[in-house]
Image (spheres, grey):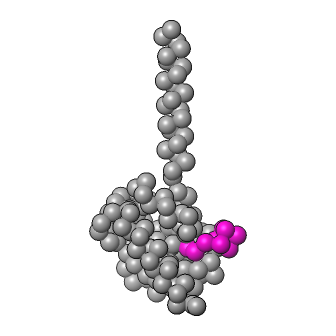
Amino acid sequence: MKQLWAGIVAVGLTMGVLSAAEKEVPWFTNLAEAQKIAVAEKKDLLVDFTGSDWCVWCIRLKKEVFNQTAFAAASKDFVLVELDFPQNKPQSEEEKKLNRALAAQYGIEGYPTVLLMNANGEVYAKTGYKPGGAAKYVKQLLELKKGKTEATK
């Protein structure tokens, strides 16, 4: 009987882990790859320029918003991209060079900078850290997206 309960508990724990993993939202680190996905899925892009291991506001944004279950709703409308500028985290020279070029292209002056773009990489909104949590942040993102849609009509 103990073995049966152990098996049931193990299955339950495994299912719990799977459902938690399913809630995780994929983040791309290559804008060009993310654009291909955005075109195919008819989504916009959310591009987070971050200093993930040193920027206090970047760390707060990730902890209070991006890592929260409520933020997963954003993946219905956006392909998510993280372009990182770490100080201590390993990163390939190719990725560093590409991220620096994109920061220059989009005129990034500080971190975190979050750009909302259409699938072609045309920016229609810019934001950053905002207090209030994930649900409030997602609501703001959708309002910014709606503003873009209304502006193009």
Q: Quick check: is 40 in the magenta stretch?
A: yes
Residue 50 visible to the viewer: no
Q: What residue occupies the far top of the structure in this picture?
A: 1
Question: Can you say which quadrant of the picture contains the C terminus?
Answer: bottom right
Residue visible at 38% across and 62% down in the picture:
134
Residue visible at 55% across and 69% down in the picture:
78
**Residue 32 placement: quadrant:** bottom right
Q: Vertical placement of 123 versus 97: above or below?
A: below
- The residue lying toward the viewer, choosing from 97 and 60, is 60
Q: Quick check: is 16 in the magenta stretch?
A: no
Residue 78 visible to the viewer: yes
Residue visible at 44% across and 60% down in the picture:
71
**Residue 68 placement: quadrant:** bottom left
Q: Position of residue 120 (x, y in %)?
A: 63, 81
Q: Position of residue 10 (x, y in %)?
A: 51, 25
The span picked out in magenta is: 36-45
Q: Position of residue 45 (x, y in %)?
A: 56, 73
Q: Is residue 87 left or right of residue 95?
A: left
Q: Position of residue 19 (x, y in %)?
A: 52, 42
What type of secondary structure mainly makes up the magenta span?
Answer: helix
**Residue 43 placement: quadrant:** bottom right
Q: What residue occupies the far right of the structure in this picture?
A: 40
How many numbered dots are placed on residues in this image? Answer: 0
